[in-house]
Every structure is written in structure tokens, then in C-alpha cells.
Image (cartoon, rainbow, N blue to C red):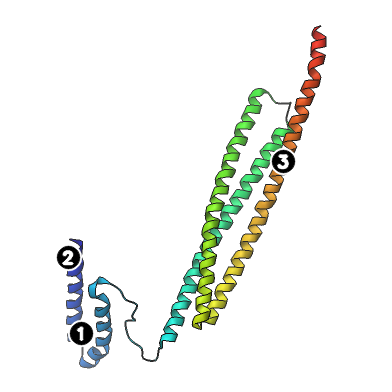
């Protein structure tokens, strides 16, 4: 049914276009005939071909290839900019999540030994939940980074194709976009690496503080036994 409907629409379009052409004056009809024939040839079989609607004699194959290469660099640059924005945002959210986890762990360490079991359990639940959030944000970073790497390679290939085709300006623009994207991602990654470094330092502090707490408990236990005796 869909195929029959498309064929009916196509024939209706051809008939209406033909009536329109015959209603025009001869001079106008002659200038429009070429465009109409181009549309009809493109629509044969319902498939669009890489042929312009109107053949312009002064455009060579080299010129058309350069134009196509420029379009490819534009598209790949757009893809790169979108993936770069997504990656930077994901890295930023990941860094925020890490800093929140660091804050919770420091809060726990500062109040160690001063909390009731209920309060300690409450903080631990927050820490566990935040660790899950950090893992989710990190996974999002990895996913967007893999797409971003593909976008960089695609843009590099497009830049090379543009250069070979003679579209030097498009090639230079694409390579500039690549350098800008890489520098922006590197800056964002520095922030996340700094956050990860602080998280490791906090973990070391936690281990040391827990060891001190355990040692102090062991030292107090003999005195308690002596008092009972």
C-alpha cells in the first residue's frame, strides 16, 4: 500500500508539474524545462542521485569534489563540537560528584568516634550512594570519550580529504577545530584528575584514621578489664 501511495503521489506531482509548464509562456517554459527534467530524472525509481538539479557547465569535477569535501568537513566539525560539549559536561559532572564524595568522607573522618551508631550509619549510607553516583558519572565519561575519539578521527580524515581535494581553507578550519576541541577536553580532564588525586589522598587519610581509632580502642580495653577486676 505504501509503495502504491508513493507511486500515486509521484505521478500526481508529474502531471501537475506538466500542466503548470504548458500553462507558461514559451520563453518561461523553455527556461523551466531543464529544471523539471532534472527533478524527473532524480525521482526515477524513488532514489535520489548525486546529480545537481541543473547542470552548470562551468563547474568542473574538481570544483564539485572540493564543494563536497567542504560539506564533509562542516558535518564532521559539527559532530566533533557536539561530542566535545557532551564529554566536557560529563567530565564536569564527574568532578563535582568526586568532590561531593570527598566532602562526605572528610565529614565522616572529622566526627569519627563522636557519632552515635545511627548517625554513623546515616553518613555511611550517604557515602555509599555518592560512590555509586561517582561510578555512574565515570561510566558516562568513558562512553562520551569513546564517541569523541571517533569524532576526532573522523574530522582528521575529513581534513585530509579536503586538503587532497584542494579545499585548503576547509582543511585548515577542520584542523583548527580539532586542536580547539582537544585543548578544551584536556583542561576538563585536568580538573577531574585533580579531583581523583584528592579522593585518593582522602582515602589514605581514612585508612590512617581508622587504624588510629582501632589502636586507641585496643589500648582502652585492658584498662577496662583492670577496672572490672
Q: Secondary structure at mark 1?
A: helix
**Looking at the rendered structure, which numbered label has been put on residue 4?**
2
Q: Secondary structure at mark 3?
A: helix
Looking at the picture, how far across and down is residue 188, in whole percent? 64, 57
**Residue under the point 28% across and 84% down:** 35
| Category of crowding for the residue at label 1, using alpha-carbon neighbours closer than 10 angstroms: few (below 14), some (14–19), many (at least 20) | some
Looking at the picture, how far across and down is residue 209, in whole percent? 76, 33
Looking at the picture, how far across and down is residue 197, in whole percent? 70, 48
- N-terminal-most mark, 2 or 1: 2
Examine the rendered structure and indicate whether residue 197 appears above or below residue 38.
above
Query: Is residue 59 shown left or right of residue 157?
Result: left
Q: Secondary structure at mark 2?
A: helix
Looking at the picture, how far across and down is residue 119, in whole percent? 65, 27
Query: What residue is shown with label 3?
Result: 202
Q: Judge by depth and name the residue closer to the eye, 21 or 120.
A: 120
Query: What residue is shown with label 1?
Result: 21
Tell us which disc is closer to us: 2 or 1: 2
Quarter holding residue 206: top right
Tell us which disc is closer to us: 1 or 3: 3
Query: Is residue 129 shown left or right of residue 225?
Result: left
Q: CA distance from mark 3 to mark 2?
A: 69 Å
Name the quadrant of the C terminus.
Answer: top right
Amino acid at each position: 500500500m505504501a509503495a502504491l501511495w508513493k507511486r500515486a503521489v509521484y505521478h500526481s506531482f508529474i502531471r501537475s508539474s506538466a500542466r503548470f509548464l504548458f500553462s507558461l509562456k514559451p520563453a518561461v517554459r523553455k527556461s523551466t524545462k531543464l529544471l523539471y527534467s532534472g527533478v524527473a530524472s532524480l525521482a526515477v525509481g524513488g532514489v535520489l542521485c548525486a546529480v545537481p538539479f541543473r547542470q552548470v557547465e562551468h563547474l568542473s569535477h574538481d570544483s564539485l569534489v572540493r564543494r563536497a569535501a567542504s560539506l564533509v568537513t562542516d558535518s564532521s566539525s559539527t559532530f566533533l563540537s557536539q561530542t566535545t560539549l557532551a564529554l566536557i559536561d560529563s567530565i564536569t559532572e564527574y568532578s563535582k560528584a568526586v568532590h561531593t564524595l570527598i566532602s562526605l568522607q572528610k565529614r565522616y573522618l572529622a566526627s569519627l568516634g563522636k557519632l552515635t551508631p545511627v548517625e554513623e550509619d546515616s553518613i555511611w549510607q550517604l557515602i555509599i550512594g555518592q560512590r555509586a553516583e561517582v561510578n555512574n558519572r565515570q561510566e558516562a565519561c568513558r562512553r562520551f570519550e569513546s564517541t569523541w575519539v571517533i569524532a576526532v578521527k573522523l574530522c582528521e580524515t575529513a581534513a585530509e580529504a579536503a586538503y587532497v581535494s584542494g579545499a585548503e581553507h576547509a582543511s585548515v578550519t577542520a584542523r583548527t577545530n580539532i586542536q580547539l576541541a582537544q585543548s578544551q577536553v584536556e583542561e576538563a580532564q585536568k580538573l577531574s584528575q585533580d579531583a581523583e588525586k584528592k579522593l585518593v589522598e582522602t582515602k589514605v587519610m581514612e585508612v590512617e584514621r581508622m587504624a588510629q581509632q582501632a589502636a586507641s580502642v585496643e589500648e582502652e580495653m585492658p584498662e577496662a578489664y583492670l577496672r572490672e577486676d
